[in-house]
Image (tube, grey):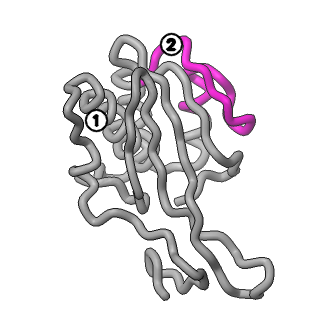
Amino acid sequence: MLVCGVPVTAQVAVVPTHDQKALLSSKDPRLAQNKKLVYDFWRIVLEAGHVEAVDQFISEGYIQHNPNVATGKQGLVAYIKRWVKPTPIADVARSPLISITAEGDLVVVSEVLIVSAPKAPGGHYTTTSFDMFRIEGDKIVEHWDSESLDPPPS
């Protein structure tokens, strides 16, 4: 089976959504706004490397829980500059997103993660990775993720 162009072996492969924009909806306008904030940050800053836009999304006192990234806005900017060269901003995320969920002040983005299969040399399998963001005052103030990858997955 091919997932994101990579052959994978799995009983049930994890596959991305085909309609990312639908992931931004919510019956609660505030939750929809929080989802869009994170989604736009993801596309513009994380994926396209436009760190000049970071002030639009990240608070000055930003707390980072990934040990590979220094806490604070400038730590995040330095990390992104190290791994992502600025590219045109895509209309949808380049990452194979599965879901974007929001509850209270938290937004969780889950995506397909393709990893090497340890029991099948040269093989791969799919699993799920997540990033969780806490929103306060229309800015991202805190971040957690499921892995401490260095460099970030593309």
Taking the spot 48% from the left edge, 24% from the top edge, the residue there is: 134
Compared with 151, 137 (above or below) is above
Packing grade of label 1 (10 A; few <14, some 14-19, many >=20) is some
Of the image marks 1 and 2, the number of the one nearer the N terminus: 1
The amino acid on which the numbered mark 2 sits, given as a three-letter code, is Glu
Q: Do the residues labelled 1 and 2 touch (CB within 8 Å)?
A: no
Number of callouts: 2
Q: What is the residue that sits farthest to the right in this orientation?
A: 119
Compared with 49, 5 (above or below) is below
* Foreground pick, 7 / 32: 32
Q: Is residue 45 left or right of residue 29?
A: right
The amino acid on which the numbered mark 1 sits, given as a three-letter code, is Lys
Q: Residue 51 placed where, x, y %?
A: 43, 34
Q: Residue 84 placed where, x, y %?
A: 51, 49
The answer to which image quadrant residue 32 occupies is top left
**Magenta includes 110?**
no
The answer to which image quadrant residue 122 occupies is bottom right
The residue where tag 2 is placed is 60
Q: Is residue 153 left or right of residue 118?
A: left
Q: Distance between the residues labelled 1 and 2?
A: 20 Å
Q: Is mark 1 on a helix, strand or loop?
A: helix
**Magenta includes 65?**
yes
Q: Residue 47 placed where, x, y %?
A: 43, 49
Packing grade of label 2 (10 A; few <14, some 14-19, many >=20) is few
Q: In this view, does 119 lie to the left or right of 70?
A: right
The magenta segment: 58-78
Q: Is mark 2 on a helix, strand or loop?
A: strand
The residue where tag 1 is placed is 36
